[in-house]
Amino acid sequence: MEKKNLLIPVFVFSLFSATAQTVSLDSILDKIQQSNPALKIYDNEIRSMDEAAKGAKSWMPPEFGAGFWMTPYQPKYWK
């Protein structure tokens, strides 16, 4: 009987004193996005492609050729 009298106040006290930490889903997803190494790799690849696209402003120079670059490899087809 003595244990039951002691457990009831402890249980009631723990109900009122314990507050759980609440975390929003957005903050969890932001934290994962900031610290996950696999996602950092993809972000760096995307940034690399973006920077390469920004720097791709030059065109290839025009080429002129009159050689055998369009001929077949086997000379028997040259006729």
Image (spheres, helix red, strand yellow):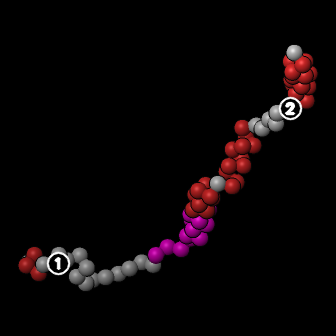
Q: Residue at x 38, y 79 (%)?
A: 63
Q: Residue at x 49, y 73 (%)?
A: 59
How far is the residue under mark 2 from the one under mark 1?
80 Å
Q: Percent position (x, y) of residue 7?
A: 87, 22
From the viewer's perspective, is residue 69 above or below residue 43? below
Task: Identify the image quadrant of the N terminus.
Answer: top right
Relative to residue 43, is residue 66 drawn left or right? left
The image position of residue 8, as x and y in percent, is 88, 19
Instruction: First in sequence, mark 2 or 1: give its number.
Output: 2
Under circle 1, the secondary element is loop
- The residue positioned 76% from the left and 37% from the top of the image is 24
Q: Main secondary structure of the magenta part?
A: helix
The residue under label 2 is 19
Q: Quadrant of the C terminus?
A: bottom left
Assess whether residue 26 is covered by the magenta stretch.
no
Contact (Cβ within 8 Å) of mark 2 with mark 1: no
Looking at the rendered structure, the kind of residue marked 1 is Tyr
Name the residue tied to disc 1: 73
> Quadrant of the rendered structure where residue 55 is?
bottom right
Residue 68 falls left or right of residue 22: left
> Is any part of residue 18 visible from this angle?
yes
The residue nearer to you, when weighing 1 against 22, is 1
The residue positioned 58% from the left and 56% from the top of the image is 38
Given residues 55 and 42, the one toward you in this image is 42
Label 1: few (<14), some or many (≥20) within 10 Å? few
Q: Residue 60 or 40: which is nearer the viewer?
A: 40
- The magenta stretch spans which residues? 46-60
Query: Quarter of the image holding residue 18?
Result: top right
